[in-house]
Image (spheres, helix red, strand yellow):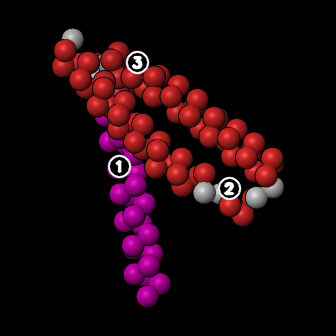
Amino acid sequence: MVVTLTVTMLLAGIGAVLFIMAGVRWASMQKLLKEGSYARRAQRQNRIRETISSVYWLTTTAVFLGWSFLTADWEITWIVWPIAGLLFGVIMCLYKLLAEKDRGQG
């Protein structure tokens, strides 16, 4: 059993090394060729997504803390987080839809 576990761990380690080496090469080529997430359009969209995300989550945190401290209903105000998570998904989907619509017109 110990030998089997050792062989399994060795194979998993070799596989991880191979995945990392291939991933680094792939990412390097994409960066050099400015493809994928390194393309100018993708970088611009990533900056916009990061800005939307930062504003959204900071506002959500402020609303949660304000509501919780003003009402002292900590056992109820936790509901902000699941609702905010769902709404964030909706907002990101809408952004993606609008970005694709603009790309199709441009």
Mark 2 or mark 1, earlier in chain: 1
Q: CA distance from mark 2 to mark 3?
A: 35 Å
Q: x%, y% of residue 7?
A: 39, 73
Amino acid type of the residue tagged 3 in the rendering: Arg
Amino acid type of the residue tagged 1 in the rendering: Phe
Inspect the magenta stretch and tell me whether residue 24 lies in it. Answer: yes
Q: x%, y% of residue 46?
A: 43, 26
Viewer-closest of 75 and 102: 75
Residue 31: tell me if it is visible.
no
> Which of the numbered marks, if any, corresponds to residue 19?
1
In the image, which is nearer the foreground, mark 1 or mark 3?
Answer: 3
Dot 1 falls on a residue whose secondary structure is: helix
> Which of the numbered marks, if any, corresponds to residue 35?
none
Q: CA distance from mark 2 to mark 1?
A: 43 Å
Residue at the spot 81% in from the left edge and 48% down from the top edge: 69
Residue at the spot 40% in from the left edge and 36% down from the top edge: 92
Q: x%, y% of residue 75?
A: 72, 64
In the image, which is nearer the foreground, mark 2 or mark 1?
Answer: 2
Q: Disc 2 marks which residue?
A: 77
Mark 1 or mark 3, earlier in chain: 1
Q: Disc 3 marks which residue?
A: 44
Q: Is residue 104 left or right of residue 75?
A: left
Dot 2 falls on a residue whose secondary structure is: helix
Viewer-closest of 106 and 20: 106
